[in-house]
Image: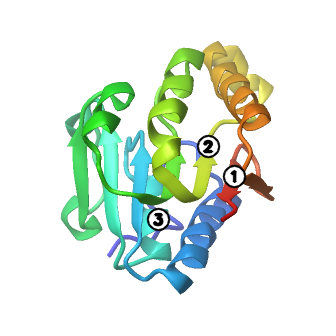
Amino acid sequence: MADYKTVWGAQLTGPEREHIKACVELLAKDKPTLTAVNIGIMWGGTMWCIRAGAPHAQLYGVDITPDKWKITEREALAATIIQGDSRICHQDFEASIDYLLIDGDHHYATVKADITGWVPKCRGIVTFHDYAPTQHNLNQFPELEGVKRAVDEWFSTHAGWTELPAPDSLRTFQWQT
């Protein structure tokens, strides 16, 4: 099985990998059959972090072009891959989500649509990647500012969520029951 610490995963730092794994482990302590959704799977790095935290989780990866990416040990990952636009395919997703990682298209409108469509299905933990990109990354990909703007707007208007400490470019929230 792939090692979540080393499997290629775009711009994931070591602390980000550990944080994702720890969030899922926290949920798995009380719910061994949890459901996790990863929006924007690329090479599968974040999916392996989720799998490491909950080996028996029902894991879903959502991407508009999943066959474009070379996911390490795809079969061993034991995930259901949903090919489609995350802004739309949430409509057909009926399961309750325990862990949600949003790392798809980083344009403001898309992040906002992912929040609107997917976050209401989650009553566990939601993590956003690229919330705080480096200036170098912003210079190369100015659309990354859309993540921060959309997340800040959502969090400022939605009660019930508490922020958890998160490293580097992650921002994480937990639903308070």
Q: Is residue 13 left or right of residue 45?
A: right
Q: Earlier in the sequence, mark 2 or mark 3?
A: 3
- Choose between 58 and 94: the one closer to the eye: 94
Please name the residue shown 28% across and 46% down the image.
Answer: 70
- Percent position of residue 35, x then y: 39, 64
Look at 29% across and 45% down and name the residue there: 93
Describe residue 120's horizontal placement relative to residue 158 as left or right.
Answer: left
Q: Is 55 drawn above or below residue 153 in the view shown? A: below
Mark 2: which secondary structure? strand
> Does the image show residue 133?
no
Residue corresponding to mark 1: 172
Give the residue type that dot 1 points to. Answer: Thr
**Upstream in the sequence, badge 1 or badge 3?**
3
Determine the CA span between mark 2 and mark 3: 14 Å
Label 3 is placed on what type of residue? Ile
Residue at 43% over, 57% down: 97
Residue identified by numbered label 2:
128
Gap between marks 1 and 3, in whole Å?
A: 14 Å
Residue at the disc numbered 3? 50
Q: Quadrant of the N terminus?
A: bottom left
Q: Is residue 6 visible?
A: yes
Disc 2 packing (10 Å; few <14; some 14–19; many ≥20): many
Give the Cα distance between marks 1 and 2. Answer: 6 Å
How far from the left and from the top, in percent, is residue 7?
44, 60
Mark 1: give few (<14), some (14-19) or many (20+) Cα within 10 Å. many
Q: First in sequence, mark 1 or 2: give its number.
A: 2
